Amino acid sequence: MFLKLSVLNDPLPVSTTVRAESAQSKSEGRVAESNPPKHVFLLGWIRSGFNLQPKSDYYVKFGESLMIQTNFVPSNKPEGSSQWWIKTNNDNGEWTPVENNNSGDITIETQKYKGVSEIQCQLVVTYSSGKKSFEKTYGSKVAHIHVTNTEKPATDIKIKLNSDYIYSIKENMLFDSSTYASAMIEPFDTTNKVHWTLGEYNSDTNVPILENELATINNSGLVTAQENAEGEVSVTGYIINEDGTSFSDTKKLKIGGGLEDRTSHVGQRATFHIETGGSDQKDDELKAATIKWYRVVNGKTKEISGNKDNHLELTTSVLTEADDGNQYYATIGNQNKKVETRHAKLTVLQATDSKIHVTTKLKNLDYEDKNNSDKTILKKVAPGDRIEYTFTLQNGSSKDLKESSLKIYLNQFTKCKEVKLENKNVDKFSLDNSDKKKQSLEIPIGQLKRGQELKVTVLTEISDVSEESFSFKPILVGKYDDDKGNGYKSEGNTVTLEYTSNNIRAIIHPIRFKPISLFERNNLKRRTIETNDPNAIVEVKDTRRKRVPARVTVKQLGNFTNERSGILDANLLFFSSQVTPLTIGKAISVAYSDEGKALESIKWKDDEGLLLKIGNSFPKLGNYQADVEWSIENVPT
């Protein structure tokens, strides 16, 4: 059977762009791109540079405006001057300064560039002490703005945050109080803009929320914490096509004072951790800092010791009921600079009863993984699978239990089909799906007598997958059936479902070839470094449960043409064990996988894969591109 698999969740073939640039149009920049800035904990920025750079490529429809934003961080230097420089494909390689623009941002009004297909711009920051010999310049990346006459709509957007935690402490000089969000759009050359909002995207209003009680966000995706804010904010990037279709993606960002409240039980311990935003670099920098921990009991503060193996953490001694309400905080820094975290509260709950047990078995009714022996972990769970949970409740204590209920969690794409207690349907269970990441299912049990064992079965169905795994602990709560009526709680072992999309997904990267001189003929041009090994030209994630042989094919759809519809005398060749020319409109195979093996990402050395053969005619000045179509297919058997 011949089955064509989707790429990037899109049933249509994926296109990518291939370019060959003439020597005169190659971008060198007004000045050389400077090194990135360097930050050292407690010292600040010790090397100046751009910590927000322009993108290498922007795509915009003629008549639309485009804002490019940068951020330059100086070290111990006086205020410098900023100058934007621009050149177009009609300027014969000459850079022109932009008047009256001494800022890190620039807005390109494309209607001012009629007949121009490419605009390049670069920001140059200059510091001077008054003497020419002490002048220092810093160059940003060169932004290539590709101007088209028609819209190219977006089909998907994914965003990421540079940090997952930012500080809201006033006058904080040690930790980040802001972070950048960035977007990856499919296709890469869409002409529509990315917009940013706090919270979920509302397609009914299309009005972004740029500020709330937790944070602010600007047009470049810079998220900044509000002073003394605490909580979790949703950061959303979205894009709207001319036909009204839209795509969005959301990430969560925690904001606070560095320490989070903790909840534990009598007889257990609690651990407090200084937040660093998920940055290994920040963790390493903090090794040089002095960290002191403090405990506040009934208003009295006492310095205590942190963990010896990790001074970013403090683990309490075994807790008693008297520890409920204690507060903990830390100071970080040295004699000159110091930050005090927020005071985090410790909540101590009643002890769990070790004689009351909850055990769990999982079963996938639609797929059996022979390597999966642990009944509390299900691997390779795919959309459409029916998952059966069996919970065994055992009362080994000396008392009867009353008003008992079992609480479990399901991910947001799981449907609860049926609940049974001792093989009898339970209709009065409650399902709370107010949390967009998980659902809470509470099942009434009622009385559980001493020595009694009850079984609860829950049948669910997976409608979609959006994360790699989902874990939870089943919780049995209620009261002892005695004169005191104290509550009890028992947690079962962790239950985990590991998901798979059960398909092949791929990200196709654009190919660029090295520049062609005007007098170059009958020569072979290699790709630029971005798509040479160790970088992948096609990033593949093969999560198929049944891995039959697969192959990747590529097909050139048309000639290389420039902005004036001129045709380049050149064609693509595929180099492997032998050389295969690409015929326009005909697909060739460029990668395979064997039976039972995953399809690997495609990486080519600079003399392998797709290369460009220049013909016998002299090329004309311009930027040339051609579309190629990639397909991933099961091999027919």
Image: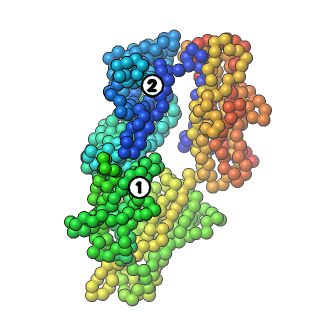
Q: Quadrant of residue 51?
A: top left
Dot 2 surroundings within 10 Å: few (below 14), some, or many (20 or more)? many
Whether residue 529 is visible to the viewer of this picture, yes or no, is: yes
- On the image, the x and y values in percent for residue 376 come to 53, 69
Q: In front here: 504 or 469?
A: 469
Q: Measure how far apart labels 2 and 1 are at the Cα level.
A: 43 Å
Badge number at residue 14: none
Using the image, determine if residue 169 lies above or below residue 356. Answer: above
- On the image, the x and y values in percent for residue 520 come to 68, 14
- On the image, the x and y values in percent for residue 443 come to 39, 71
Left/right placement of residue 202 relative to residue 382 reads: left
Using the image, determine if residue 50 lies above or below residue 515. Answer: below
Residue under the point 57% across and 14% down? 24
Left/right placement of residue 535 relative to residue 452 reads: right
Q: Which residue is mark 2?
A: 139
All told, the count of numbered labels is 2
